[in-house]
Amino acid sequence: MRSSTLTNRVALVTGGASGIGLAIAQKLYQAGCHIAIADLDLSKADAALAEIPQREGQQKLALHVDMADYPTVYRMVEHCEQALGSLDILVNNAGFQHVAPIETFPPEVFQKLIDVMLVGPFVATQAVFARMKQRGWGRIINISSINGKIGAPYKAGYCSAKHGIIGLTRVTAAEAGDSGVTCNAICPGFVDTPLVQNQLADLSAGYKVPTEKVIEDVILPNVPQRRLIGADEIGDTAVFLASDEAAAITGQTINVSGGYVMS
Ligand SMILES: NC(=O)c1ccc[n+]([C@@H]2O[C@H](COP(=O)([O-])OP(=O)(O)OC[C@H]3O[C@@H](n4cnc5c(N)ncnc54)[C@H](O)[C@@H]3O)[C@@H](O)[C@H]2O)c1
């Protein structure tokens, strides 16, 4: 559905070549935004954009970024603003998972998780913040997780980064003040994407259940709705947070988890 308040806004989604990021990019494009997908894998970003049917008058742009490599993050923002004329909606979504007990968790992987999912989003926010405030309108949407609110075994780096980005979200909202810029975090539960599918084998080892039973025996018993979340449901939440209707919502963490986490 095209939203009049989002028509011709420019949105940039990091990690937009797959899963949740791609669904958010698709939904924002359908709502009338020009869209930039930035990803570590530029060819995958190009391919993802090609799959989104072209709409008259709306632009699509694929960009390379490594969220752990800060100069590429600044360049991503500059390229987007130059090519599409603005950057009104920043979605910090790129991420990955590593599952291991604390005793064997490699410190360099812990650091990388923090770099990609906390420091990178901070740098992207820094790059867009002043101009968003000058323009008097902006949306920063950080993709945290229910693991930003609860500790999950074997996810030390991921949980630390996802808790951290909730703090960044609140500070960004506080500093945005009355500028017209809002910042919120979405906290998805388990969403059916490659990131979840790729961790099942490691969770199977940790919980000592067969890989094909992890979803049914480990994940779903904690979810009142007894289902995985669809990436499109996260996309719909992002579109709402980006809209003018959500102007008073800032500094919030929105769980989209089928009831897994309720606070
Ligand atoms: N899938 C879930 O259940 C779930 C739940 C809660 C939160 N999340 C969060 O949602 C976001 C997207 O996850 P997803 O499930 O869609 O995963 P995904 O693996 O489908 O997509 C992640 C994307 O991020 C990109 N990426 C990875 N490292 C990058 C880097 N250094 N720089 C730029 N791009 C990079 C990948 O190339 C990929 O396109 C992540 O932040 C993840 O932590 C996912």
Image (cartoon, rainbow, N blue to C red):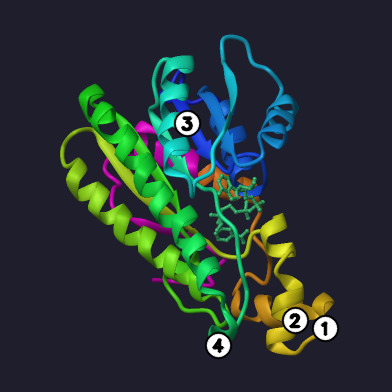
Q: Which mark is residue 204?
A: 2
Q: Does the residue labelled 3 lie within 8 Å of ligand 1?
A: no
In this rendering, the answer to whether 90 lies above or below 137 is below
Residue 184 seen in the current view:
yes
> Secondary structure beneath disc 4?
helix
Chain-order first, disc 1 or disc 2: 2
In the rendered image, which quarter contains the N terminus? top right
Chain-order first, disc 1 or disc 4: 4
> Secondary structure beneath disc 3?
helix
Q: How crowded is mark 3: few (under 14 residues within 10 Å), some or many (20 or more)?
A: many
Q: Give the range drawn in magenta.
A: 238-263
Q: Which amino acid does label 3 sit on?
A: Met
Q: Residue 103 carries which label?
A: 4
Could you tell me which residue is drawn at 41 percent across and 56 percent down? 118
**Residue 168: quadrant of the picture:** bottom left
Q: Which amino acid does label 1 sit on?
A: Pro
Compared across the picture, whether 176 is left or right of 158 comes to left
Indicate which label's residue lies in the foreground, 1 or 4: 4
In the rendered image, which quarter contains the C terminus? bottom left
Could you tell me which residue is drawn at 59 percent across and 21 percent down? 60
Q: Are marks 1 and 2 in contact (CB under 8 Å)?
A: yes
Residue 192 seen in the current view:
no
Residue hosting label 3: 76
Compared across the picture, whether 205 is left or right of 120 comes to right
